[in-house]
């Protein structure tokens, strides 16, 4: 069974409490439940992780590179400025889908640019928890191709 790393960046551990008017009431545990359910239906296994630390996230990306693991990544704030994360992702050896709960293009102007989008297979944004479901479905199709 293929393992997919589902990596989540800063402040996503606070989902449910953090700006619920923007991010909703779902928690990271709810994200994990959706991912596990979707993955099981696709014959995949997930390893969901969250960190507020850029270096730790990059270390996980290096692990994905070395193990040739597909990645669903919500880089959160790192989306907009982490060139170190972008450079690590450029080494990828398996499918990569960027994911966001909200639609960054419909939010503040500083959120309109993703420095990681250019090295991802695609981006799913704006569908809340369903964004993760769609991203895992995209990973499954990329693996099958």
Image (cartoon, helix red, strand yellow):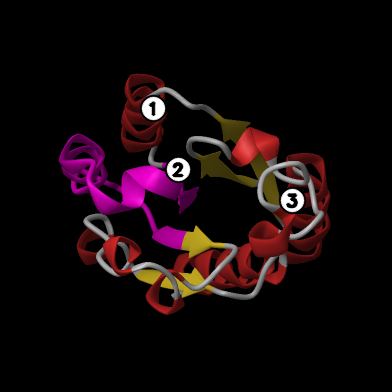
Local SS, label 2: loop
Q: Which residues are magenta?
A: 69-98
Asked if residue 102 lies left or right of residue 83, the reply is right
Of callouts 2 and 3, the N-terminal one: 3
Where residue 31 is drawn, which disc sits there?
3
The kind of secondary structure element at disc 1 is helix
Question: Badge 2 is on which residue?
Answer: 69
Residue 9 vs 136, above or below: the answer is above
Q: Residue at x 30, y 69 (%)?
A: 109
Residue 35's spot in the image, x, y percent? 73, 54
Q: Nearer the viewer, residue 66 or 124?
A: 124
Distance from disc 1 to disc 2, alpha carbons, whole Å, reads 8 Å
Q: Do labels 1 and 2 touch, CB within 8 Å?
A: yes
For residue 114, above or below residue 4: below
Residue 124 visible (yes or no): yes
Residue 128 lies, in percent from the top left, at: 68, 67
The quadrant of the rendering that contains the C terminus is: bottom left
Q: Is residue 22 above or below residue 46?
A: below
Give yes or no for residue 87 being in the magenta stretch: yes
- Relative to 90, is 6 on the left or the right? right
Q: Which mark is residue 63?
A: 1
Q: CA distance from mark 1 to mark 3?
A: 22 Å
Q: Where's residue 138, x and y in %?
A: 53, 72
At horizontal 34% and vertical 43% (from top left) the residue drawn is 78
Q: Which mark is residue 75?
A: none
100 or 58, nearer to the observer: 100
Looking at marks 1 and 2 on the same chain, the residue that comes earlier in the sequence is marked by 1
């Amino acid at each position: 069974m293929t393992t997919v790393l589902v990596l989540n960046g800063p402040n996503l551990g606070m989902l449910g409490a953090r700006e619920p008017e923007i991010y909703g009431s779902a928690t990271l545990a709810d994200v994990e439940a959706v991912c596990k359910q979707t993955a099981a239906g696709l014959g995949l296994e997930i390893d969901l992780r969250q960190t507020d630390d850029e270096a730790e996230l990059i270390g996980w990306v290096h692990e994905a590179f070395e193990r040739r693991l597909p990645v669903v990544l919500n880089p959160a704030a790192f989306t907009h400025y982490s060139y170190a994360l972008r450079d690590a992702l450029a080494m990828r050896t398996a499918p990569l889908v960027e994911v966001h709960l909200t639609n960054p293009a419909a939010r503040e102007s500083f959120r309109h640019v993703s420095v990681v989008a250019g090295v991802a297979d695609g981006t799913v944004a704006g569908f809340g928890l369903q964004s993760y479901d769609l991203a895992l479905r995209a990973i499954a199709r990329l693996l099958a191709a």
